Structures are given as C-alpha cells and as structure tokens.
Amino acid sequence: MPTISGITQQIFGRKPGRGLLLTGLAIILAFVILAVLAPWIAPYGPTERSVPSSLAASPQPPDRNHIMGTTELGYDVFSRIVWGTRIVLYVVAFSAILSMAIGVPLGLVSGFYGGKLDRILSMVMDSIYAFPGIVLALAVASVLGPSPTNAAISLSVVYVPTFFRMVRGQVLEVRESLYVEAAEALGYPNTHIMLYHVLPNVAPTILVVFGLAATDAILTEAGLAFFGLTVSYPSPDWGLDLRVGLRYLDQGAWWATLFPGIVITLLALGFALVGEGLGERYAIRTER
C-alpha cells in the first residue's frame, strides 16, 4: 500500500514529467510570493492614484515610475496586478479544495459501494457535467452575488463532477484488487478499507485532477471577474482589469490589457504544467 513518503518520492523523483512539474511549481511559487509580499512589492496601493489628477483622465504608458503604465484613474497597473494576485489565488485555491473535498468522498463511496447509490450519484454528476463550465459558473455566481467567496463556490460546482468521475473510475479498478479482497477477508470495516487501502491508490489521480481543475478555474475566474461577478471596480482583479482596459484599447493603451492577460496566462500555465507533469508521471488520462 502506498505511503505518504512513497507518494512524495514518486512525485519529485527523477521520472518522466519532473521538468514540467518543477517548472509549474516554480511559477506558482512566484505568484504566491507576490500575494504574500504584496504590501512590500507593490509600489502603490491597488486604488491609490499615483499620477497627478491632470494626467489621470487617460491611461499613461509605462515609464520609470510605472513599469506597466497606469489606468484611466491613475492606478498603477503593476500594483493592481500584485494585489490582485491575492484575490485570484484565493478564489482558485478555495474552489479547487472545496470541489475536491466534495467530489473525492462522493466518488470514493460511489465506486466502492456501487448499486443504486452509484447510479443516482453518477446521474446527478453527469447532469451537472453536461453544462459548459463557464455557463454554469456564471449562472451560479449570478444567483449568489458578486464576491470572491461566492465566485469560488460557483467554480467548485463546476469541478465537483470532474473529481467525482475520475475518482470513481479509479476506485472501480482498485476495488477488485487482491489486497482489498484480503482486507475484506480479514474483517476490516469498509471505512478502514476505503481510507487506508483504496484512497492512497487513487491519490495520484486526485493530484492530477486538482492541478488541471485549478488551471481551468483560473481562466473561468477571469471570466467571472470580467463580468463583474468576483469583485467590483476599483477592487483589483486581473479579469476585471482586463475588461476595464478594453475600453481604452482603441486609444492605444495596450498595457492596460496586455499585462493582466499575461499574468492570467502565466498562472494558468503554472498549474497546467503541474497537472501535465503529474499526468505524465502516472500516465493518467484526464477529462475537462
């Protein structure tokens, strides 16, 4: 039966996917550092006007004092990106953890026990899975109202079926293993078997799905923020800043959309590399 130390060795050992995994983790770590050290890294506050009022009527291009330019209200783009990292990471992490906390136990129980419970849960999850992710997230977020926590909850609704389907499929295979049959023959309760014999063997799948779900959550969160369903302006959020910057793109203010778009892409790339690296390591096929 795999142990925590054994799984850790498998993840970081010299095996296929190690380069992708370490690169992705380095990118994610860089954004975590930005979020934690935002008060010291950002030269201005996220809603602090950093240019004279005479210049704040239109976005100002990058210069020595504003390396990524300013917005139409005189907000420093770099500072807003740094502060916005906190909101984006909170929404993405909360949504991925919440969806994992719901989807994994349901998939574990459904695959282990089977029968009518399995059919009911599978039908419910397939019904949710049938909706396009961004449409479902927009619908739920619209009902709950704009806030980072509500955005995270709406995203978790989208990814619960993904965790459920992948874990259930793995459990159905592990359920027939000889060591599981041996544990049953020795009289271990089902809860013990699921937690100590089945769950450790589906842990690699959970890690892969977590990474890829977080990747999709970043892009979907940007979509929610774009429509004002995460925070309200002038609170900093990459997707929201992207929408605001589009108003001035025809005036040549390319920096107001370019830099928020770059950081969205970079963070999504980081999680994608982690997911793909783990997927190569364990040769796991994933969905959505």
Image: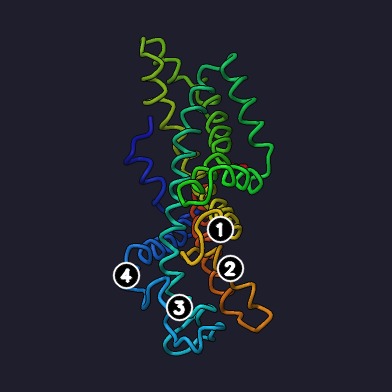
Camera-side residue of 135 and 286: 135
Residue type marked 1 = Ala
* Separation (CA) of disc 4 from disc 2: 22 Å
Q: Which residue is mark 4?
A: 39
* Separation (CA) of disc 2 from disc 1: 9 Å
**Residue 205's x, y, as percent?**
50, 39
* Separation (CA) of disc 3 from disc 2: 14 Å
Q: Which residue is mark 2?
A: 242
* Separation (CA) of disc 1 from disc 3: 19 Å
Q: Is residue 254 left or right of residue 67?
A: right
Are the residues flagged by discs 2 and 1 in contact, CB closer than 8 Å? yes
Are the residues flagged by discs 4 and 1 in contact, CB closer than 8 Å? no
Q: Which residue is mark 3?
A: 76
Residue type marked 4 = Pro
Callout 2: helix, strand or loop?
helix
Query: Residue 93, relative to residue 70: is it above or below?
Result: above
**Residue 136's x, y, as percent?**
63, 43
First in sequence, mark 4 or 1: give its number.
4
Task: Give the colour scheme of this rendering.
Answer: rainbow
Are the residues flagged by discs 1 and 3 in contact, CB closer than 8 Å? no
Camera-side residue of 29 and 71: 71
Are the residues flagged by discs 3 and 4 in contact, CB closer than 8 Å? no
Where, by quadrant of the figure, is residue 260 drawn? bottom right
First in sequence, mark 1 or 3: give its number.
3
Quarter holding the C terminus is top right
Query: Residue 65, relative to residue 123: is it above or below?
Result: below
- Residue plotted at (37% across, 13% down): 189
Give the class, few, some or many, for how many residues have Cα within 10 Å of label 2's Cα (few <14, many ≥20): many
Whether residue 280 is visible to the viewer of this picture, yes or no, is no
* Separation (CA) of disc 3 from disc 4: 14 Å
- Disc number for residue 225: 1
Give the class, few, some or many, for how many residues have Cα within 10 Å of label 3's Cα (few <14, many ≥20): many
